[in-house]
Amino acid sequence: MTVRTVHLAGFLALLMCCWPAMAQAPRTSRIDINNPWARTGIAGGMSAAYCTLTVRDADDRLLSVSSPVAEQAGLHETTEDHGVSRMRSVEPMAFPAGSTVVMKPGSTHVMLMRLTRALGENEKVPVTFTFEKAGAVTFYFPVAKVAPLPPMELMTPAPMDHKDHKHGG
Ligand SMILES: [Cu+2]
């Protein structure tokens, strides 16, 4: 009985001290990823990493990406303009609470440039995403069995996307 009373008092004290904070939106976000994978690559070459990234609980902004296997990394978006693929940097990227970005070949991707070493099948590549509120979060991307591609090839959709691709029109 005494223990229960103490617990209740503690709970009430906690509730009272935290009530103003609880009434507001969470101050930090939570980052979830699904289906991470990265391309194989050769030392000094390029690779790209893909995943489905969701930001929960609070609005946030992705400021930068980095990886120890690449001298330079960045969040890119591939767009097609009259049949010509172009890539551009999309940092920083705003993530409203609950929003998801699907990174896939021919679309948004993490570009890994000037690889410090070869990326082989079955290993896992760490990629760190730095968010304004959530801070730095690191996820591991399994390297998929995809042949290393020359830089220009990285700018075009991979064969697996061709079925969704309408030419002409
Ligand atoms: Cu790119």
Image (cartoon, helix red, strand yellow):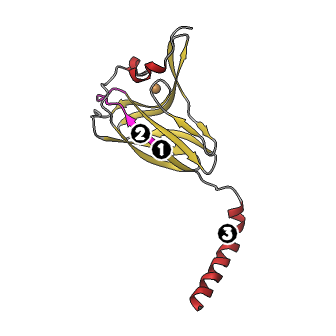
Report which residue position mark 2 lands on.
Answer: 36
Q: Is residue 47 above or below residue 97?
A: above
Q: Can you give x and y, in whole percent of width and height, for residue 76 in the image?
A: 50, 29
Q: Amino acid at mark 1?
A: Ile
- Front tag of 1 and 3: 1
Question: From mark 3 to mark 2, how far is it between C-alphas?
Answer: 37 Å
Q: Is residue 132 above or below residue 165?
A: below
Query: Is tag 1's residue or tag 3's residue first in the polypeptide sequence?
Result: 3
Overall secondary structure of the magenta section: loop
Q: Can you give x and y, in whole percent of width and height, for residue 149 in the image?
A: 34, 22
Query: 2 or 134, which lies in front?
Result: 2
Report which residue position mark 3 lands on.
Answer: 18
Tell me the residue at 61%/45% (across/down): 98
Residues shaded magenta: 34-46
- Front tag of 3 and 2: 2
Residue that lies at the very extreme toward the top in this rendered image: 168
Report which residue position mark 1 lands on.
Answer: 33
